[in-house]
Amino acid sequence: MSEHVDAPMRQQVSSPRHPRALAPANLILTILLSVLGALVGVQVLATLGITPSTSLIGALVAMALARIPLTMLRGFRSVHAQNLAQTSISSATFGAANSLFLPIGIPFLFGLPEMIGPMLIGVACAMLLDAWLLYKMFDTSIFPAKLPWPLGIAAAEAIKAGDKGGRQAWYLLGGVGVGVAGAIFSLPMSALGVALIGGLAAMIAFGIGLLTGGFAMPLFGLNLSAMYLPQGMMIGAGIVALVQVAWIIVKARRRSAAVAAAPSANLTETAAIAIADRRLGRAFGLGSIGYVVIAAGLALGTGLFTQMEVPALIGFVAFAAAAAFVHELIVGIAAGHSGWFPAFAVALITLLAGIMIGFPPEALVVLAGFTAATGPAFADMGYDFKAGWILRGEGTDPAFELEGRRQQLIAGMIGFGVAIVVVAVAYPIFFANGLTAPINAAYVAAINAGIDGDTAINLLLWAIPGAILQLLGGAKRQIGVLLATGLLISSPLAGILVAVGVTLRVLLKRFAPASVNDAIEVSAGGIIAGDALYSFFSGAFKAIRF
């Protein structure tokens, strides 16, 4: 079936009505879950340095409410209402922690408390734009709905199993058991689950990056980060990925022109792709303008305009907007293919680029916060839309799919709105106790240390192989970005589990009967879900004890 849900040839006579995000029961649950998700996200990030995945918590709460014999709760029996619940809490968690609390901690640690308020407003706008852009770009050539988006598969399979039960539920529960058991022993079990369902070429590149980054020092005494190899590779791969996106948009415009000139009777799959990618071009243009406006607003609100000459200020706004867009695309690509996204590391790379250009420290503080804010909300919405796409029939009913995605956007925006309020109220308490995101110290240290000529040369040299790999792999495989992602994460255990998953996947596809292969995706979703659930509860418990 097509990846593109708005093909005219697939219209149905009528579509079922999707639950409304603003219906009273859904709205109340959305707000309550969003408050919980935002508080947990900020607390766990500040104390442990990670952001827990709360998506499944929202779905489980909705499932539990559906079992209560009250008329007002009957609507939660719908898998689509449960999808709205998981969308809202997940949006609030990642939005509050990664897109809001983390960025405003940078000016706090740098000794610029007067920048916190303007920074919060700016990154909140960037977060909302982030989510809207994914809404427009989802199910296009860059971010097709058929990308793995592994956490989305896990959420969808959990919801489906809870609704239908049967053999699929046992496959899921078995996967959850494996995921929890491995997580108890501190194994990154989501890496195994992702390897079973991710794109094969992307998973191989990701696994090689994880293994290389993890074993380079213990086996060969090579500190790849000190050589700036991962950072340089990501710079090269990211630049080529941006060019590939631009080329896709150019081709989409050509297809649109061809479709417009053709008789309506000749509408085919190409026409469907052109219609979907037309959204992509408009989103890319509006997103670029939006990021320029937000960057200019940050420069105005934080007082940078009083410290920089006009040409330097214009250059900063242009660079910050471009860096935010590139950061968003890289994080989205990595999340869509692997379920892992190096948002912190890529933001640090853009900061290093700003240091190389020579922006003043205050501008670098704004740059670090602005770029760090873009990407996490974008990636998280991709997971949620993937879950909804599966639950709505994988695009078989275009009208229902688009309506459901629109309701998910509303639920997500409610979650983001709650996150803004929670962070605005909570951050003074956290900062007063010296609690910020641990990665903020690395950003501040980089700004204070600056960068020398040798570092710049290393970044540029390693950018070349990153660019070549991304070019050879093409826009669909994204092996340059995924290899660099693995290098930046640098987890040998994750690399081993990815290798095990890829090997198991190849062997099962070659020798196992079709019935076994059909169970792999459900079981893989369960492994990811088990890892996420254990991480959430153990992280929340540790944060409370802290």
Image (tube, rainbow, N blue to C red):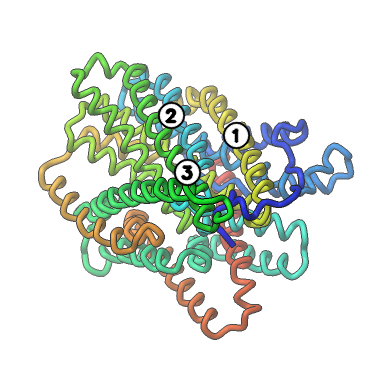
**Numbered disc 1: secondary structure:** helix
The tag on residue 415 is 1
Tag 1 near tag 3, CB within 8 Å: no
Cα distance in 3D space between marks 2 and 1: 15 Å
Cα distance in 3D space between marks 3 and 2: 28 Å
Looking at the image, which residue is at 63% across and 66% down?
Answer: 522
Between discs 2 and 1, the one toward the N terminus = 2
For mark 3, does the 10 Å Cα neighbourhood hold few (<14), some (14 to 19), or many (20 or more) residues? some
Looking at the image, which residue is at 43% across and 63% down?
Answer: 494
Relative to 503, 320 lies left or right: left
Relative to 209, 536 lies left or right: right
- Three-letter code for the amino acid on which mark 2 is drawn: Val
**Image spot of residue 45 (x, y percent):** 48, 40
Which residue is denoted by mark 2 in the rendering? Answer: 123
- Three-letter code for the amino acid on which mark 1 is drawn: Gly
**Image spot of residue 21 (x, y percent):** 69, 36
- Three-letter code for the amino acid on which mark 3 is drawn: Arg
Q: Nearer the viewer, residue 241 or 266?
A: 266
Residue 274 sits above or below residue 447 on the image: below
Relative to 121, 398 lies left or right: right
Which residue is the extreme one toward the front? 263
Residue 272 sits above or below residue 381 on the image: below
Q: Nearer the viewer, residue 202 or 212?
A: 202
Which residue is denoted by mark 3 in the rendering? Answer: 278
Cα distance in 3D space between marks 1 and 3: 28 Å
Looking at the image, which residue is at 54% across and 80% down?
Answer: 508
Q: For the N terminus, which image quadrant? A: bottom right
Q: Quadrant of residue 374?
A: top left
**Numbered disc 2: secondary structure:** helix
Res. 429 in view: yes
